[in-house]
């Protein structure tokens, strides 16, 4: 087992779940969140006790700012039942099978002492009696003896108890794996059949795996039992076997359908084909069969339609050029030489080059952008076969080009119009790659003077469908490959951003692409922040299975040295995350609205600080084992997570990490902020691999909130302000500041200070109302949906009209939008104007 350390721990539930005890019930409750994610267990509300000494009675009542809790026997789930979260609670769900758990006796005459602070240990495996002994090495050079036994081993949890210390960790069986589980089960007195193979005991082991969702292990155990114990089994054993195999078949059918849905969403079409072949219709329910049939139809329609579209477009280009279209562009490499086109008219040359790019960029998920081309190309083929004339190749290619850069509604068979849009696309890519401001301006003004003018709406649509401006060659990858090993997954590359404002040497980071990645389709991104004892390549490797399964790009900035360096909460390293994300957008097709943060231990602190400082950039925040700083950081910054979904996994023995997390969640849950927490019994700051699949399930459909970014609850007065105490934390969705008063900045102060704050909303009649404190200037960025651009915009700050401001009709400034796009690389948050106001 891995090396761990413990800081001074608190009692199991005193700090986070004061007064809560383990509850058991025969029925299970289910809490379903509005995006479909759900948790199961026993639902209850945190209580507190009121004493009435005069009348001599005690009363339990719901605790003020108390938590709604689901107890699943392994962990406590904390969530908000506030109306804003719109959760559905299903009470007393029937039909769930009782889980069979195996137990061992606890130690007699146990003498309990507190777990020493900062104890280091390396624990061995458990013996055949499910016991182990090891030393706790203490900072002063001494040591304590630790003796443990597995008290409970069940399909979902393992409970360990100590003979000498107050430490009873609850561990998900997912963290063990089938091999370790089997080695324990086969030594339990109820299951040990070493003297004589016993079908009943073998089937109990197989059923354990089935209940724990280790379906492959369950099948293997059944096969092993049949091989090891040939001959006739008893009637009862045979009936048990038949029932188990039928249950396994149903579970496998459900798993195939569930995984098909995930594969389709992750664009894993090759993986989806393999899953289609594994579905056993005879074992599936009618509901499962219907889901499978729909998914199969979607997969079987999408892939052939894509292949046909690609073939038709390549044929159109080849008819016009006389050249074979090479599929090099999809890999991010060159498109081949076009020297042979020089004898063709210039317009034809441009159509051929652009059409070849489109062929290379096509992907099953985006081929419908040129559906109009496909239909007319099919019509043309039929007409040609009948001896009639259809669309000319130049018209068909023009349809493909215009539909590709603008979407289906922008398809146009006029070659001149299509090439004008294509030239704008090429200019936008050149703009993204030009580092000198004056040259970017020259590119913009040159395009404004040539051809037809385009509106900001057209340019924003073009930006939406742009490829990466500097696509990585997927055959000859950029960066340095990290050699794979038992601890390091294949496909991890080390890259550098190049010079950035905060570091001339740039930022080093690791990146790993999901299976079946293609530049023509956008992918969600997780930025993972590691801890000193877990190298970033190991962290990416631990996340890689779920990232592949769900289609996520993984990246890890290199932010710490080899020592146990604590995150300092100054914000000085935020650029390592932000510049890494910006660089990834230049080389890979990142979905701007699905960028999330993940961190472990000190990396979780880093992630929580970045997320709460820049909440408008992220779809979600995953923090495993954080120790968030309450004062001064989250004493104020908890408000900034109004629209940022947060999932924290930590242990009930995490000391100050638990205490401070509770303070934050008391504010969040009470106000309906989108945060949940998973609190493991008897655990400290550890890697909770049993939560990884849940984290990805929770994150899978999350998208960044854009727009006004304020949280209205029962009334406007309940809107919380966004807080800032650093000059870099200067934009929250659409409002912020270019200049914050020095006295409202932390600047390393140890004493008390008042951070700056801002909150704003837009009301009818284009009236922007802002409340601010500690800001010399207030900035307001507006996109095309936020105001009526034909009417004057009125502004009030702290009930007053800003100095020198007069209500005015604002211009949609295309050059401003492009410069914002260059700076941030954000395809969906495209602002058209910015007001700089003085309160």
Image (cartoon, grey):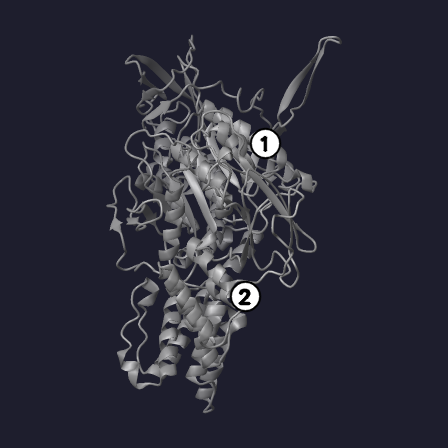
- Label 2: few (<14), some (14–19) or many (≥20) C-alpha neighbours in 10 Å: few
User: Picture coordinates of residue 483 (x, y %)?
Assistant: 23, 45
Indicate the position of residue 342 as horizontal and vertical percent values.
29, 83
At 27% from the left and 55% from the top, the residue drawn is 478
Q: Secondary structure at mark 2?
A: helix
- Residue nearest the observer in this picture, 555 or 48: 555
Circle 2 is placed at which residue position?
Answer: 457
Report crowding for label 1: few under 14, some 14 to 19, many 20 or more residues within 10 A (C-alpha): some
Circle 1/circle 2 CB separation < 8 Å:
no
* Location of the N terminus (image quadrant): top left
Q: Nearer the viewer, mark 1 or mark 2?
A: 2
200 left or right of 332 in image: right
Residue drawn at x 37%, y 36% as measured from the top left: 178
In the rendered image, the vertical position of residue 511 relative to residue 102, given as above or below: below
Horizontally, residue 462 falls left or right of residue 711, namely left
In terms of secondary structure, where does tag 1 sit? helix
Q: Position of residue 324 (x, y in %)?
A: 31, 77
Looking at the image, residue 457 lies above or below residue 628: below
Give coordinates of residue 290: x percent, y percent.
Answer: 56, 56
Q: Which one is nearer the viewer's eye here, 351 or 520?
A: 351
Q: Which numbered disc, 1 or 2, marks the residue that appears first in the sequence? A: 2
Residue 667, label in figure:
1
* Image position of 90 (left or right of 493): right
In the rendered image of this protein, does residue 706 appear above or below residue 134?
Answer: below
Q: CA distance from mark 1 to mark 2?
A: 40 Å
Residue 174 seen: no
Does residue 212 appear in this view?
yes
Q: Residue at x 33, y 82 (%)?
A: 321
Considering every residue shown, the one lying at the far bottom of the view is: 387
């Amino acid at each position: 087992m891995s090396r761990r350390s413990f800081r001074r721990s608190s009692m199991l539930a005193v700090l986070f779940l004061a007064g809560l005890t383990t509850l058991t019930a025969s029925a299970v409750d289910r809490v379903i969140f509005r995006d479909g994610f759900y948790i199961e267990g026993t639902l209850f509300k945190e209580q507190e006790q009121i004493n009435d000494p005069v009348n001599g009675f005690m009363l339990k009542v719901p605790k003020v700012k108390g938590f709604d809790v689901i107890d699943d026997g392994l962990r406590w789930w904390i969530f908000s039942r506030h109306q804003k979260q719109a959760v559905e609670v299903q009470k007393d769900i029937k039909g769930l099978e009782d889980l069979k758990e195996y137990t061992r006796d606890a130690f007699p005459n146990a003498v309990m002492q507190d777990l020493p602070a900062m104890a280091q240990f390396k624990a061995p495996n458990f013996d055949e009696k499910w016991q182990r002994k090891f030393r706790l090495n203490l900072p002063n050079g001494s040591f304590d003896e630790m003796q443990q036994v597995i008290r409970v081993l069940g399909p979902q949890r393992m409970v360990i108890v100590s003979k000498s210390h107050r430490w009873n960790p609850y561990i998900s069986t997912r963290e063990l794996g089938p091999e370790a589980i089997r080695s324990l089960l086969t030594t339990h007195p109820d299951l040990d059949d070493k003297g004589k193979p016993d079908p009943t005991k073998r089937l109990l082991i197989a059923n354990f795996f089935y209940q724990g969702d280790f379906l492959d292990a369950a099948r293997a155990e059944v096969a092993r039992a049949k091989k090891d114990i040939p001959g006739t089994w008893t009637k009862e054993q045979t009936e048990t076997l038949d029932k188990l195999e039928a249950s396994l078949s149903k579970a496998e059918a459900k798993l195939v359908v569930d995984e098909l849905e995930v594969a389709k969403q992750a664009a894993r079409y090759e993986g989806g084909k393999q899953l289609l072949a594994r579905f056993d219709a005879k074992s599936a329910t009618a509901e499962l069969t219907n889901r499978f049939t729909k998914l199969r139809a979607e997969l079987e329609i999408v892939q052939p339609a894509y292949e046909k579209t690609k073939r038709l477009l390549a044929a159109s280009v080849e008819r016009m050029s006389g050249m074979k279209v090479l599929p090099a562009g999809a890999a991010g490499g060159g498109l081949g030489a076009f020297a042979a086109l020089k004898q063709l008219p210039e317009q034809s040359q441009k159509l051929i080059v652009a059409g070849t790019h489109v062929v290379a960029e096509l992907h099953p998920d985006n081929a419908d952008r040129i559906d109009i081309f496909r239909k007319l190309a099919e019509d043309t083929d039929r007409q040609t076969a009948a001896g009639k004339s259809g669309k000319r190749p130049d018209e068909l290619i023009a349809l493909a080009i215009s539909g590709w850069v603008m979407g289906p509604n922008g398809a146009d068979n006029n070659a001149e119009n299509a090439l004008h849009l294509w030239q704008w696309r090429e200019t936008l890519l050149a703009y993204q790659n030009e580092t000198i401001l004056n040259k970017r301006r020259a590119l913009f003004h040159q395009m404004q003077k040539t051809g037809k003018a385009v509106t900001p709406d057209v340019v924003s649509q073009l930006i939406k469908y742009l490829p990466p401006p500097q696509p990585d060659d997927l055959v000859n990858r950029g960066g340095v490959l990290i050699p794979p090993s038992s601890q390091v997954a294949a496909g991890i590359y080390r890259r550098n951003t190049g010079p950035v404002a905060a570091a001339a040497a740039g930022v080093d980071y690791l990146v790993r692409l999901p299976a079946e990645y293609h530049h023509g389709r956008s992918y969600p991104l997780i930025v993972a922040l590691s801890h000193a004892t877990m190298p970033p390549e190991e962290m990416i490797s631990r996340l890689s299975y779920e990232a592949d399964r769900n289609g996520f790009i993984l990246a890890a900035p290199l932010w710490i040295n080899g020592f146990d360096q604590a995150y300092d909460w100054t914000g000085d390293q935020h650029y390592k995350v932000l510049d890494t994300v910006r660089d990834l957008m230049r080389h890979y097709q990142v979905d701007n609205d699905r960028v999330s943060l993940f961190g472990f231990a000190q990396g979780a602190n880093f992630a929580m600080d970045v997320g709460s400082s820049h909440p408008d950039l992220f779809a979600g925040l995953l923090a495993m084992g954080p120790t968030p700083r309450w004062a001064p950081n989250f004493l104020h910054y908890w408000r900034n997570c109004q629209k940022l979904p947060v999932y924290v996994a930590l242990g009930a023995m995490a000391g100050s990490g638990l205490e401070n997390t509770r303070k934050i969640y008391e504010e969040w849950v009470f106000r309906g902020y989108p945060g949940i927490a998973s609190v493991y019994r008897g655990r400290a700051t550890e890697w909770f691999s049993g939560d990884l699949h849940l984290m990805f399930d929770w994150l899978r459909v999350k998208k960044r909130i854009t727009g006004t970014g304020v949280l209205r609850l029962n009334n406007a007065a309940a809107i919380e302000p966004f807080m800032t105490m650093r000059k870099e934390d200067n934009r929250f969705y659409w409002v912020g500041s270019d200049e914050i008063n020095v006295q409202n900045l932390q600047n390393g102060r140890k004493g008390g200070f008042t951070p700056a704050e801002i909150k704003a909303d837009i009301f009818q009649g284009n009236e922007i109302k802002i409340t601010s404190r500690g800001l010399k200037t207030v900035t307001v960025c507006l996109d095309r949906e936020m105001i009526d651009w034909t009417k004057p915009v009125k502004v009030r700050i702290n009930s007053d009209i800003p100095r020198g401001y007069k209500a005015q009709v604002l211009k949609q400034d295309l050059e401003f939008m492009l410069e914002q796009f260059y700076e941030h690389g954000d395809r969906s948050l495209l602002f058209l104007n910015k007001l700089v106001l003085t309160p």
